[in-house]
Amino acid sequence: MTQLSGDARLPLHVLVSDDLKRRMAEGEWDPETPLPPERRLADEYGISIGTMRRVLNELAVEGFLVREQGRGTFVRRVDFTSSFTRFFRHGEDPGSLPESRIISTEVRPAATEVAAALELDDHAQVLVIDRHRIFEGTPRLLETIHLPLPRFESLVDLPAAEFEPLLYPMYETRCGETITSASEVLHIDPATEQDAEFLGIDAADPVVRIERIARNLLGSPVEYRTSRGHALGFTYRLDIK
Amino acid sequence: MTQLSGDARLPLHVLVSDDLKRRMAEGEWDPETPLPPERRLADEYGISIGTMRRVLNELAVEGFLVREQGRGTFVRRVDFTSSFTRFFRHGEDPGSLPESRIISTEVRPAATEVAAALELDDHAQVLVIDRHRIFEGTPRLLETIHLPLPRFESLVDLPAAEFEPLLYPMYETRCGETITSASEVLHIDPATEQDAEFLGIDAADPVVRIERIARNLLGSPVEYRTSRGHALGFTYRLDIK
DNA sequence: AAGTGGTCTAGACCACTGA
DNA sequence: CAGTGGTCTAGACCACTTT
């Protein structure tokens, strides 16, 4: 029977939930292999099936698990369908991938706001990646990505051509970091000269600036990313309650 | 014992949940009076306490109910804390209310996109309200509000001075319509002359345009509102997963 | 057919709120 | 103190997926 750590005054379902999150964070199950069935998990934790179901269902509501009747319970990958940056894709086929072009990768000490976002000591070393994202042949986003070292050491000497268009799967396979949540802040700025040149827009046009902090399952910040794109034509949809 | 309508092949908890939503929509409980305790509700519906608790907890997760241990279960009022328009208030005390100035109220046939948003027949009559919202003495938002007639008849001849700064409580007390959800879409536009003049911004500056459809508990659209404000300095925060 | 999650029951006991 | 929601148990049976 699995031993539970944590404050014993907390409700059982909280202790079990925390333990399952820890095991998921340690990579005990990948998204293709089911967790043990609820009856067996209940036995292992020495709790009743009703309590075990409560834990699993709550983790499913929180987005950590996906449950499929007849198949099993699986850990879930994030998809960023509600991300702001998705809205730069315009009329494009939502299944297609934007092209990515790495402009430069460089190691340097973190600027103050970067260190704060990544919860690092001031002047800790970070890997800085500049890239362009190109949708249907049209340049749409300028991105600057900050990754803490030494956790992302294995990307430092990677040639630009070997970067894949989607970075998060790379973080997982090459660095063992799985992104499971993020927060983004949107601002509207006047375009800089660099913006106007790359995005092919009027120097007087506004740009959308999106700052994202991406986190792993334990809630630690893993990536800090700034994206800039043309604001005119930008659209974002929000549902309240 | 309460009689349940609806497709009997559906799970019990769905039928009970739908029935409770209907009763809430009919105004059976206001936000200050608790629903009957879960034990009594379970008896009335002839279901077990476990199933009744599941229904109440799910309605709480969906935002329809608030449960307070020792006090009871209450229907919940929406607050629009995550609404885009909140972000025009800048550094202001979040508890203070913006000033509202009604510019005009007018009855006219709905434009095509208004009729579509409110799910009305083309050219159905709507009440159109133009107003300004002023935060800390500074004009920040231009709003145009569309309300379907005859549901909002009682506002047609109301003098501008009798409109309150918050419209949703007025809709409830004067017209019997309770707003419980909304969806908003954000765009960035170039300023019009009217925008620049009222908002006191440069004619070259961009504006944020927010289109909101507000709905009642049954999901029917009740209000269509367009708000415009200065885009530079606008900020919006999003949490993913 | 075997194994998964989904629905539902009928309780017991605990923690918190308000009078 | 009475009454509320919160936690937890120990099952039975159903619906769906896979082999």
Image (tube, coloured by chain):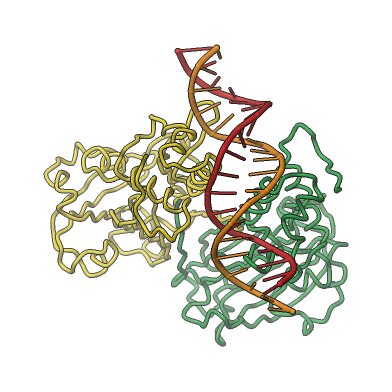
Chain colours: A green, B yellow, C red, D orange
Whether residue A103 sits left or right of residue A149 in the image: it is left
| Residue B94, above or below A30 | above
Coordinates of residue A44 in the picture (x, y in percent): 82, 50
Q: Is residue A127 or residue B150 the one in the foreground?
A: B150
Residue A102 appears anywhere in the view: no
Q: Residue furthest bottom?
A: A137
| Residue B177, above or below C19 | below
Q: Is residue A233 or residue B39 the one in the foreground?
A: B39
Q: Is residue A32 or residue A183 the one in the foreground?
A: A32
Coordinates of residue B116 in the picture (x, y in percent): 27, 67
Figure label count? 0
| Residue B216, above or below A212 | above
Whether residue B110 sits left or right of residue D9 in the image: it is left
Q: Residue D18 sits in which quadrant?
A: bottom right
Residue at figure coordinates x 87%, y 76% from the top left? A157
Coordinates of residue B165 in the picture (x, y in percent): 30, 39
The quarter in which the N terminus of chain B is drawn is: top left
Residue at figure coordinates x 62%, y 68% from the top left? A79
Q: Residue furthest left?
A: B157
The quarter in which the C terminus of chain B is drawn is: bottom right
Whether residue A51 sits left or right of residue A86 in the image: it is right
Q: Is residue B49 or residue A62 the one in the foreground?
A: B49
Q: Residue B121 sits in which quadrant?
A: bottom left
Residue A33 appears anywhere in the view: yes
Residue at figure coordinates x 66%, y 47% from the top left? A50
Coordinates of residue B234 in the picture (x, y in percent): 48, 54
